[in-house]
Amino acid sequence: MTETTYWFEHAWLDTHVEPGVLLEVADGRIRAVRTRTPAPPPGAEVLRGLTLPGLANAHSHAFHRALRATVQVGSGTFWTWREVMYGVAGRLTPDTYHALARAVYAEMALAGITAVGEFHYVHHAPGGTPYADPNAMGEALVAAAGEAGIRITLLDTAYLSAGFGQPPDQHQLRFSDGTAEAWAERCSLLKEHDHARIGAAIHSVRAVPAGQLATVARWAEERRAPLHVHLSEQTAENDACREAHGCTPARLLADHGVLGPRTTGVHNTHLTEEDIALIGGSSTGTCMCPTTERDLADGIGPATALQGAGSPLSLGSDSHAVIDLLEEARAMELNERLRTRTRGHWTAAALLRAASADGHAALGWDEAGSLEPGALADFTTIALDSVRTAGPLPRLGAETAVFAATAAEVRHTVVGGRHVVRDGAHTLVPDVPAALAAAVEALRG
């Protein structure tokens, strides 16, 4: 049995910040949490700063990281951005995707992220020909997460059409398995690992014909796996859905058995009151990705109304314009302030839960995201002596992390009781910036 004792100068224990906390870890799980420990005992790992449960990035497209700083200027919409994104997707191979994802996941670890939900749809070679190993691309992502030291839920994504009644275009051929049945057959070959779980995703209602939605939902239900779906991100998709089916995307998903407590709608931006009631009433989750939603000019989703209706909230960095879950948490509150011109929609503690425990739950890691006995020993420590956090902030508790700190404050990240980031340096990927630069350069068109 591998045992380690950690002493936290300050720790967030779900409701408050406690000074002097001792954490006993055995075989990757928390065995005991002891408060009122003013000094570290001999042999304990000392983590100074504010320790939080590991953060969960519930929505990622790892290859989008190659677009950072190349698509942030100029005019256009989501749809014009998508054409640039397709260019990068077309150049991916299992090897280049592995190299990029390994670096991206290492960047996430440096930002305090201990688990990622990878919304994966680049399955085949350009033109749609399967690789000799039909899951070569997905397995490259799973391996990349393991080498970067974080957990992954591979949300293998059904992407079968370009739009309602339209076959895949030339860019999308490598995304498509042809039918939901063929998608399910391929997905069933994927194997889970200690650090990796397999979930499912429906790219969107435009990308999976209505008659095949239930096949994807059934695959996830039989395995009790998470199921994610891009939902109402764009008004154009909503209009096209109404024209094709006479209803909103949320209603279409509800009618085909997709909504439910293991399902998460990503973005959930342009919703009707009935949509909100359908999502909340079915306990379907909502993953907000504020930095991407504002980068792509998508809009601000009704997060407070969704949560009030019964939809648990999680957070994702999506296109990785920024990888910073503290910024995502802060942005969700600040977006709502802009929309309503009032303040204080969530407590800082509630925002941290969205970034940690509720995000892990959305990815099927219910045993992660809290500092309590029995939980996975996944946590991150932020500095309290930086230019952003210096001062009498520890007593303010979770507000320190949400409204003052950024990913730059992360000093340590521990996954399964093992240091992945120590003193701000990744222990498994020696030079993350160089790895990112090399991987991105390999994909430049």
Image (cartoon, rainbow, N blue to C red):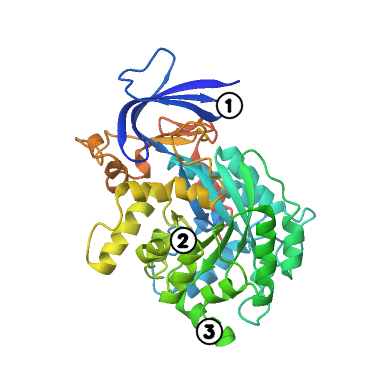
Instruction: Give the residue type at disc 1.
Output: Asp
Q: Residue at x 22, y 64 (%)?
A: 342
- Could you say whether the residue bearing mark 2 is in a helix, strand or loop? strand
Q: Residue 242 carries which label?
A: 3
The answer to which of 197 and 405 lies nearer the viewer is 197
* Residue receiving disc 2: 286
Percent across and percent down for residue 71 are 44, 64
Q: Which mark is residue 27?
A: 1
Instruction: Give the residue type at disc 2.
Output: Thr
The numbered mark, 2 or 3, whose residue comes first in the sequence reads 3
The answer to which of 276 and 97 lies nearer the viewer is 276
Percent across and percent down for residue 207 are 62, 72
Instruction: Give the residue type at disc 3.
Output: Arg
Q: Residue at x 35, y 25 (%)?
A: 35
On the question of residue 440 being in view, the answer is yes
Q: Residue at x 60, y 20 (%)?
A: 1
In the rendered view, does 265 fall on the left or right side of 7? right
The correct choice, above or below, for 57 with respect to 385 in the image is below
The Cα atoms of the two marked residues, 3 and 1, are separated by 52 Å
The numbered mark, 3 or 1, whose residue comes first in the sequence reads 1
